[in-house]
Image: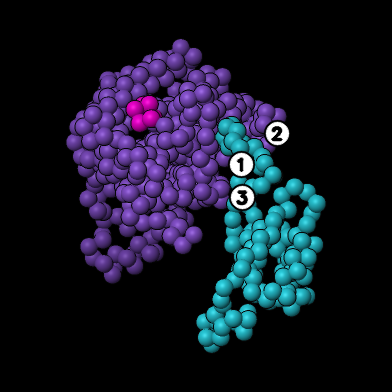
Amino acid sequence: MINNKTKMTLTLAAVPAFLAVSSLPAFAQDAAAAPVEYPAIFNTLLFLVGGFLVMWMAAGFSMLEMGLVRKKNVSMQGLKNITLYAVAGIMFWFTGYNLMYTGVDAGFIGTFGPYAFPEPGAGTAEAGYSVASDWFFQMVFAATTASIVSGTLAERIKFWPFIAFVAILTGVLYPITGSWQWGGGWLAEMGFSDFAGSTLVHSVGGWAALAGALFLGARNGRYGANGQVTPMPGSSIPLATLGMFILWLGWFGFNGASQLAMGTIADAADVSRIFVNTNLAAAAGVVTTVVLLQLIYKKIDVTMVINGALAGLVAITAEPLAPSVPVTLFIGAVGGAIVVFAVPMLDKLKIDDVVGAIPVHLLAGIWGTLITPLSGSGNYGTQLIGIVAIGAFTFIASGIIWAIFKATTGIRVSEEDEAIGLDKAEVGVEAYPEF
Amino acid sequence: MKLISAIIKPSRLDAVRDALSAQDIHGMTVTEVRGYGRQKGHTEIYRGAEYAVNFLPKLKVEIALTDEQVAQAIESITEAAQSGRIGDGKIFVFDLLDAVRIRTGERDTEAL
């Protein structure tokens, strides 16, 4: 039965279709989209829009990191972020996607090999969405994971070993752990829950960063023999703040498009609800950090508040659809609190995390994943198994890779280069030459 | 001729400039500097770590003048730059051996 609305749509579609057909004989076959394709088109649209929003998070990371490093290292931080995004994109085509999604079958790994896209004009609605749009959406998530690592290791890591690590992370490590859940692997079979990647993306990036920080060591002069901590304030609070807001915006794509469907009103409503929860979790993270900082330090460090917003976002990423608003606020708030206590704690442990990526992505990521049962997703036991399994694999594998690089190419610039700054030492372009 | 080098609080610059203009002294060079005297600085906190800020932002105002203008200039600068609190700054007076106006080549007090 074709209803009136569909008849109208088909009739309207037929007019330009007829014109198209009569002027371009080769286009005879698919002049008007059949109704069965609309959901696939909307799903594809969700992937494309969500995908480019997450791509924009690369700008967010860049601004945040460039703002939090010292002037002499700003160009390098920009270069690292640009290059890692490019390398991630290529590696995810070269090995990443198939390793993560093809032939996983409740197992531990997918298939090696580059991904193949449909020829132009040959796309179908068979999968329920465009295959390339799905690849694009998944690729930007891999790139996000790599971005997390660059912040922690800033101001003293050699460029090339870092990029080589990124290639392995995005081409091999991230896809393997990702296959366990989103690729339909053993964790998914077990009922593990990670909607948009608190563990698969954020804690993976965090574990890789932590392993790197341990092998790399702290910046020179940072920690004294008697526990003194020497701050190295960032060069641009405006850039850091802008970066945070760009990330916040991108997160609507990150979480929202992880619904993976927008072809029905129910799905569209769910995506909308995800936007709401995502925003509120960040808000709760901010408010919590602001209040705690005032109470503890009597001064409110804007860079920690930025971390608090992001921690709230990371925490809700494991389950941004199900929670009620109060639960969402609770999850985001704890994320913010984690930042306030974890940042100084890392300093006590002499782990030099330049931008606070470990508290924000690793610790808040673990928290967000662990608490999903509160919203009815998964159970605490399974969540813990997933967190530990992915954590162990990523941390150990990353550690091995960092160790190999440290022993062969070296991963740290010379003391002299660290002092004059990486912009002069490795980039050859100063970020602020006239100041 | 003399060269006065006055270290003042940044917020007092406009007042010092106005006071010197009133005395018909037009021409000064201002540099942003950091320093301390008896004003010890303060502690700040960045990401949970306390640190001592010993060097405070100040402005160094350099003025070349004739010997006759010096006493009045010192008085004007002092009055304009004073707040009564520690950290107001200092004035140093140097002998100036020569001065040249680059555009015209004038020398000595003609160049001031």
Residue under the image location 32 percent in, 40 percent down = A414
Residue A164 position within the rendered picture, expressed as x and y whole percent measured from the top left? 26, 38
Q: How many marks?
A: 3
Q: Secondary structure at mark 2?
A: loop
Point out the image quarter for the N terminus of chain A: top left
Q: Which mark is residue B35?
A: 3
Residue A73 position within the rendered picture, expressed as x and y whole percent measured from the top left? 41, 47
Among the chains, which one is purple?
A
The reply to whether callout 2 and callout 1 are in contact (CB within 8 Å) is no
The reply to whether callout 3 and callout 1 are in contact (CB within 8 Å) is no
The tint chain B carries is cyan
Main secondary-structure element of the magenta-colored stretch: helix
| Circle 2 Cα neighbour tier, 10 Å, few/some/many (<14 / 14–19 / ≥20) | few
Which circle, 3 or 1, is nearer the viewer? 3
Residue under the image location 27 percent in, 20 percent down = A107
Gap in Å between the C-alphas at discs 2 and 3?
Answer: 27 Å
